[in-house]
């Protein structure tokens, strides 16, 4: 299983890197939209939404991404304000709504959780990925690496040292030792970014960069646990079977859905500062 997981991850990584550096904006937006559509299909399967609901979520999630990808940024006068509002709502959702949802084990029922949450997560993540790449492809790569490093560090630290369960009723395999491993890995990576990427070092002082590192791990954990709860409520192990060794698309991008809006918000802060 680990070998298959690594092979799939390497293939995905090479494909994404090539897409980041060589696709035009409209094609990158189309690729993001395709991933969003696949995620919508799996999301609707988990929370039991029919075809009409899938269509509504898909359109409201994808259309903003496609529009912004095909329109030069300077022609969208209100884009910074709209992005700021979208990121603020999304980050608040992950830092406040989701922890409450997880703590009280609230069933994902009603239009808010089934529709609004899906549209908010997918559209904000997609827009952040579009803007990060537009600003600098290396920033997009760095954002993806933050999520990957958090995931890998948590996996190996939890496997080697894991004893204290993080949320046994939601995801029995996750441990506090794994979270500490993720914190250590992301802190080291973000410190390297701060020292070697001038645009980040000039915009953020070191304490703020360290705070952002901790925030990154927190939202990645929230994204992972939130999807685990949805799968547990649905009675399934994986959200799908599209990616060998990883499960479905949502299984692969759960932490990314939570982290990318934070990275997009940081980019917007840097641009407006």
Image (cartoon, grey):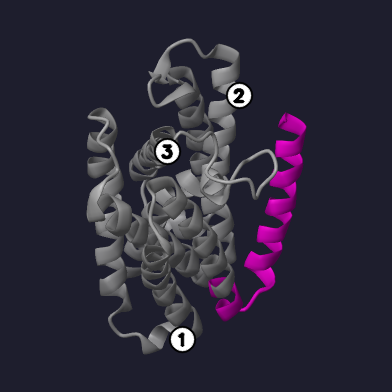
Residue 265: tell me if it is visible.
Answer: no
Q: Quadrant of the C terminus?
A: bottom left
Check disc 2 and report the residue beneath it.
156
Q: Residue 178 vs residue 90: left or right?
A: right
Say whether residue 192 is magenta.
no
**Residue 169 seen in render:** yes
Residue extent of the magenta highlight:
1-29
Q: CA distance from mark 3 to mark 1?
A: 41 Å
Looking at the rendered structure, the number of numbered marks drawn on it comes to 3
In the rendering, at what x and y percent does residue 139 appear? 53, 59
| 180 w.r.t. 268: above or below | above
| Residue at left offset 36%, top offset 47% | 205
At a point 57% along the width and 27% down the height, the residue shown is 155
Which residue lies most toward the top here?
163
Taking 255 as reference, is 74 above or below it?
Answer: below
Q: Which residue is mark 3?
A: 234
């Amino acid at each position: 299983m680990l070998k298959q997981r690594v092979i799939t991850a390497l293939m995905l990584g090479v494909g994404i890197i090539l897409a980041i550096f060589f696709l035009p904006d409209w094609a990158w937006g189309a690729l993001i939209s395709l991933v969003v559509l696949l995620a919508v299909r799996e999301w609707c399967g988990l929370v039991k939404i029919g075809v009409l609901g899938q269509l509504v979520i898909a359109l409201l999630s994808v259309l903003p991404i496609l529009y912004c990808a095909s329109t030069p940024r300077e022609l969208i006068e209100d884009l910074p304000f709209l992005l700021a509002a979208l990121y603020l709502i999304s980050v608040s959702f992950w830092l406040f709504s989701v922890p409450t949802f997880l703590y009280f084990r609230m069933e994902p029922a009603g239009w808010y959780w089934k529709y609004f949450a899906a549209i908010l997560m997918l559209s904000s993540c997609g827009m952040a990925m579009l803007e990060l790449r537009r600003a600098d492809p290396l920033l997009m790569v760095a954002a993806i690496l933050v999520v990957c490093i958090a995931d890998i560090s948590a996996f190996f630290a939890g496997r080697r040292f894991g004893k204290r369960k993080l949320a046994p009723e939601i995801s029995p395999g996750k441990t506090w030792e794994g979270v500490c491993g993720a914190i250590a890995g992301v802190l080291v990576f973000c410190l390297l970014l701060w020292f070697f990427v001038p645009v980040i070092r000039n915009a953020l002082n070191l304490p703020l960069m360290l705070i952002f590192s901790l925030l990154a791990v927190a939202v990645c954990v929230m994204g992972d646990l939130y999807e685990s709860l949805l799968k547990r409520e649905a009675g399934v192990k994986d959200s799908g079977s599209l990616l060998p060794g990883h499960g479905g698309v949502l299984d692969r991008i759960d932490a990314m859905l939570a982290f990318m809006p934070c990275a997009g918000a940081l980019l917007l802060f840097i641009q407006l500062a």
